[in-house]
Image: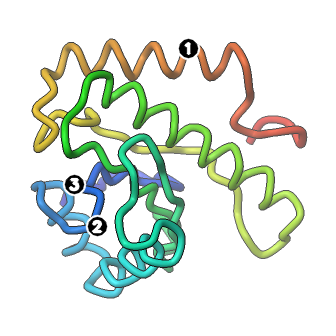
Amino acid sequence: MFFVFLSDCLVAAGNTMGEPVGNLDQAILQFFGPSLEFSIKDRIQAEFGGEQPVGSSAIIATGHPDHPYIAHTPCYPHRAWVAYDAMAAMLQAIRVHNAEARFDGGRPRICRVACTGLGTYTGNRHSEAAAREMAQATREFFNMKCLAGPAGPC
């Protein structure tokens, strides 16, 4: 099993339609079951009209106590700076989730994130280039914002 540690949110770098095309996508769905794929596709249909843009991220509840959320963050089809755009979108989606969770006592905040190299499988991004882009997006995000929002750190 891939998920040997606890994380509040696993980042699934799927495609824009929510189809599980990569090895990690398959492992995530095998772990959580087919209902997660339906939840992802339903969210994509409701929020994005059936195709989630590259450079966006959607936080989706899994119903699992050890890994309560998935950040569906499409990285395919490939484009320049896909890892940067995906990382920035995922961090922003978590920031928004945490800000909203502050006012919703039943929804836990996201404090621990498990993320692989974004865009490195079907997005065809070289792992070193993806790592540089993801690091740059993270540095810029934390220079401007805080994941925890106004309530303070997790």
Residue type pointed to by label 2: Gly
Tell me the element at label 1.
Answer: helix
Q: Nearer the viewer, mark 1 or mark 3?
A: 1
Q: Do the residues under discs 2 and 1 have CB atoms within 8 angstroms?
A: no
Which residue is drawn at the image coordinates 61% and 40% (left, top)?
A: 92
**Percent position of residue 29, x then y:** 24, 72
Q: Earlier in the sequence, mark 2 or mark 3?
A: 3
| Residue type at numbered disc 1 | Arg
Question: What distance separates the C-alpha of mark 2 from that of mark 1?
Answer: 28 Å
What colour scheme governs how the chains and residues are painted in the rendered image of this protein?
A: rainbow
Evaluate if marks 1 and 3 touch, with contact meaning CB atoms under 8 Å apart. no
> Looking at this view, is 69 or 124 the one in front?
124
Residue 2's disc number: 3
Q: State which tag comes first along the sequence, 2 or 1.
A: 2
Label 2: few (<14), some (14–19) or many (≥20) C-alpha neighbours in 10 Å = many
Q: Along the horizontal axis of the image, is 92 left or right of 17? A: right
Residue at 40 percent across and 37 percent down: it is: 86
Q: CA distance from mark 2 to mark 3?
A: 20 Å
Dot in front, 2 or 1:
2
Spatial separation of the CA atoms under disc 1 and disc 3: 27 Å
Crowd band around label 3 with a 10 angstrom C-alpha radius: few (<14), some (14–19), many (20+): few
Q: Position of residue 110 (x, y in %)?
A: 63, 52
The residue beneath circle 1 is: 139
Looking at the image, which is closer to me, 91 or 62?
91
Mark 2, residue position: 18
Numbered badge on residue 100: none
Secondary-structure class at tag 3: loop
Label 1 Cα crowd, 10 Å radius (few <14 / some 14-19 / many 20+): few
Q: Position of residue 133 (x, y in %)?
A: 36, 17
Compared across the picture, whether 93 is left or right of 32 comes to right
Q: Is residue 151 above or below residue 66?
A: above
